[in-house]
Amino acid sequence: MPADISKPSVTRGAPQELLDLIPRMPLLPGEDAAAFADLRQGFLAELAPSTPYQTALAENLVVLEWEVHRHRNLHNGLLRTSTRKTAQKRWETETHGPFGDALGVSQEAKEFAEGLLDPASEHAGSSINGLAEREIDLTEIVATAYREVADALQMHERKLADLEKRRRHLRDDYDRLKAARTHVIEDAKFVTDHDD
């Protein structure tokens, strides 16, 4: 069940009633609510919105940035999972013949894939050696893995390109709004023309 981030806190110039109208950002399972809160706090501190509308735009920038983060993670997760499965299948085929993966995934195949995906793994050295011994190119494994999930990856790549454009346009709008904002001069006096 997705977690919801709490309502935005009051920002200068934005009364709580208006901020309550801004919808919450629902998080997907596995997403870090604290990381989102930190991102939001950092953005709002940098943008320093001073009106309700600026606050709404700043909140939209936070959401867009989180969506970019989300789609990058989903893209990378898909490719890593596909690479793991492809590496395991290749290990089983190279070790047990063309139907080697029909028996399921062996512990050796799991360790082989782990070593390829995590250079800090205790299996990294033996995985690289296993590639060399079998004359397997790691790029071939990754390319096969990419091909297996290409449609899903391309959807995330298109979404990332769209989000980048939207984020740039919104930031430009925000910056123009901030630059055009008139500032109150505290000791100014209102002068009227009178024909006396």
Image (tube, rainbow, N blue to C red):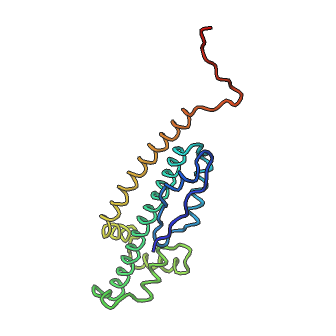
Q: In which quarter of the image is residue 78?
A: bottom left
Toward the viewer: 129 or 105?
105
Q: Which residue lies furthest to the front in this view?
A: 196
> How far across and down, in percent of the image, does residue 21 sit?
49, 54
Taking the spot 35% from the left edge, 89% from the top edge, the residue there is: 104
Quadrant of image for the C terminus: top right
Residue 130: x, y in percent? 44, 80
Q: Residue furthest left?
A: 98
Side of 98 where 80 appears, left or right: right
Depicted 99 relative to depicted 75: above or below: below
**Which residue is depicted at the point 58% across and 61% down?**
37
Vertical relation: 84 (above or below) 184: below
Position in image of residue 117 (x %, y %): 47, 73
Please tell me which residue lies in front, 70 or 120. 70
The N terminus lies in quadrant:
bottom left
Instruction: Name the residue at the right extreme.
Output: 187
Q: Is residue 28 found left or right of 54 in the rendered image?
A: left
Q: Which residue is drawn at 37% across and 57% down?
A: 157
| In-image side of 190 versus 170 (left or right) | right
Q: How many marks?
A: 0
Residue at the bottom extreme, as displayed: 103
Residue drawn at (60%, 60%) of the image: 38
Q: Where is residue 79 in the image (x, y as percent from the top left)?
A: 40, 68
Residue 183's place in the image compared with 41, above or below, is above
